[in-house]
Image (cartoon, grey):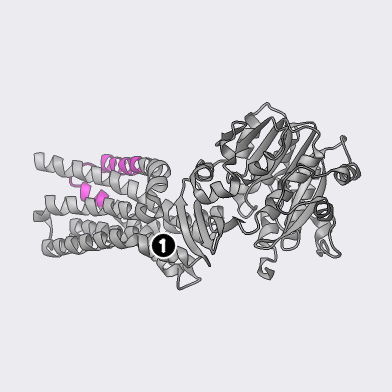
């Protein structure tokens, strides 16, 4: 009776462990797909859907197997340990040789999903000798769901930030391997083909050890293949992948594979981002930056002697921490985040505005491009309406708005959405060699100044005493003039307002002619 009870307890503990491993496998593959292919919402939807569909197929296939169920369960766990542990190595390694990496990730999702779907009914049938049907199913599903909860928490707070996408899959494979090993060595007398199972144990052990040793160089090789220049730093945070590359004496920062700036010409982005708004504002007492965790916009703000306070809101703690500690970013931002006037808040920009009661004289929005649905709320009508209520009487807001040349409709959509929120807007642009033609939108409350009044104030503005590398009065005036035909898009007159419920900006951005660049 004791041996029966022991078997049942080990089986239930294993279900908990496999439930944990299963959900983490789904998250690992979805995160890999997001980083390598972009578009978080789409990739998570497709990857998770494929895995769930495959789990259903696995459950259906399992009913065809009637004998030697314990042997079969151990074999499934060994296979899962190999596939799960290999996920990142396969994805990154093959990324260096094929552009169809999505097919690799989706194939892994289907294969792992099949095995996960196969193991649950298998465990239920193994356990039917020890518990009646209603108790058996309830206990198996309960332990599986509890394991999924713990797995999700571990992935979000421990595995991804500390083990990254290099070692999280290996740790995941080790869980399935431990389950298979526990059953093998505890109940090998019950196995039909114990010698084959023991051979599988030693083969998988050798494979996992070899994988743990070689994973990092393989993934670095695959990572490097995605960038033209040498990677000198990379980090996977809870929210994003940070990479710094180097060419000669210049460095590039990438977030999830997208260029954020280059020390070669970043002043051609950050000086236009900051100085027109600061010249237009009548007070510099209270400044808000949404995004901008690299500290470069803060560097430009600190050139004004009458700055009162700067609040920087960046969701990911990893970015400001990197800006405060990494020599490349410290050299670029002049250790700006260490200034006592700067307060860093780690919160979603939209949530911060909803919870704040403060008014600001200048708001600088330096958020990522609107290339995924999960960013749409930060470019939406209600976001700008909320922002308008946080502007002081003569307050100024500026947002980066992508490229008016490559993504004309997206640029116009941002401008129109801000106007629909009760703001008077003034778009402008500049050529950034490493990024192409880039644009921003200045705005103030409607009724304070019209577009003409904003232009006149900027024409009277001067940068005397402000040390800049690129921007002067002539360049600033030129930025507010667009060449002939820039906005001659056939649907420019039909551009819609971007809202949470109808995120048209995402479609405009995806339909942009980035292939021209």
Residue range in magenta is 123-147
Instruction: Classify mark 1: residues with Cα within 10 Å, few (<14), some (14-19) or many (20+).
Output: some
Quadrant in which the C terminus appears:
bottom right
Check residue 144 for magenta coloring. yes
At x 60%, y 46%, the residue is 333
Residue furthest out toward the bottom: 97
* Residue 277 percent coordinates (x, y): 77, 42
Residue occupying the far front of the picture:
465
At mark 1, the secondary structure is helix
Q: Is residue 107 at least partly visible in the picture?
A: no
Q: Residue 178 vs residue 336: left or right? A: left
Residue pointed to by mark 1? 220
Q: Main secondary structure of the magenta part?
A: helix
Q: In the depicted view, which residue is nearer to us: 344 or 99?
A: 344
For the residue pair 443 and 503, the one nearer the viewer reads as 443
Residue 221 % position (x, y): 41, 66
């Amino acid at each position: 009776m004791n041996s029966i009870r022991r078997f049942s307890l080990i089986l239930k503990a294993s279900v908990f462990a496999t439930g944990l491993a299963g959900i983490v496998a789904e998250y690992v593959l979805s995160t890999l797909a997001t980083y390598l292919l972009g578009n978080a919402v789409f990739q998570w939807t497709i990857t998770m859907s494929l895995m769930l569909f495959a789990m259903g197929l696995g459950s259906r296939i399992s009913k065809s197997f009637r004998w030697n169920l314990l042997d079969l369960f151990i074999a499934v766990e060994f296979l899962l340990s190999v596939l799960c542990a290999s996920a990142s190595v396969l994805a990154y390694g093959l990324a260096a040789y094929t552009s169809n990496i999505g097919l690799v990730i989706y194939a892994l999702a289907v294969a792992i999903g099949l095995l996960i779907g196969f193991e649950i009914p298998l465990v239920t049938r193994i356990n039917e000798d020890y518990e009646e049907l209603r108790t058996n199913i309830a206990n198996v599903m309960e332990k599986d769901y509890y394991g999924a909860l713990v797995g999700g928490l571990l992935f979000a707070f421990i595995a991804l930030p500390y083990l990254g996408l290099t070692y999280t899959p290996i740790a995941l494979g080790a869980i399935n391997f431990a389950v298979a090993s526990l059953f093998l060595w505890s109940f090998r007398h019950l196995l039909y083909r114990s010698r084959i199972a023991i051979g599988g144990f030693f083969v998988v052990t050798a494979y996992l050890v070899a994988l743990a040793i070689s994973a990092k160089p393989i993934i670095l090789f695959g990572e490097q293949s995605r960038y033209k220049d040498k990677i000198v730093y990379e980090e996977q945070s809870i929210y994003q992948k940070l990479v710094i590359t180097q060419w000669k004496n210049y460095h590039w920062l990438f977030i999830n594979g997208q260029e954020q700036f280059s020390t070669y010409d970043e002043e051609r982005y950050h000086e236009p981002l900051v100085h027109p708004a600061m010249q237009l504002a009548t007070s510099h007492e209270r400044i808000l930056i949404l995004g901008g965790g690299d500290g470069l916009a803060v560097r430009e703000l600190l050139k004004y002697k009458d700055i009162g306070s700067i609040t920087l809101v960046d969701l990911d703690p990893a970015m400001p921490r990197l800006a405060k500690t990494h020599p490349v970013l410290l050299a670029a931002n002049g250790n700006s985040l260490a200034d006592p006037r700067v307060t860093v808040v780690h919160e979603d920009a939209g949530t911060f505005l909803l919870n704040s009661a403060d008014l600001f004289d200048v708001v600088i929005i330096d958020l990522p491009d609107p290339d995924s649905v999960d960013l749409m709320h930060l470019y939406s009508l209600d976001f700008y309406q909320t922002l308008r209520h946080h502007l002081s009487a003569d307050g100024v807001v500026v947002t980066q708005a992508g490229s008016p040349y490559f993504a004309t409709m997206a640029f116009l959509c941002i401008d129109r959405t801000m106007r629909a929120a009760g703001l008077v807007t003034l778009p402008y642009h500049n050529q950034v060699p490493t990024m192409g033609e880039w644009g921003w939108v200045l705005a103030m409350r409607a009724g304070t100044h019209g577009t003409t009044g904003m232009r006149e104030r900027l024409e009277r503005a001067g940068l005397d005493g402000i040390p800049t590398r690129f921007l002067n009065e002539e360049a600033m005036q030129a930025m507010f003039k667009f060449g002939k035909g820039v906005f001659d898009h056939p649907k420019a007159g039909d551009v819609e307002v971007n809202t949470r419920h109808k995120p048209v900006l995402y479609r405009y951005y995806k339909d942009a002619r980035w292939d021209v660049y």
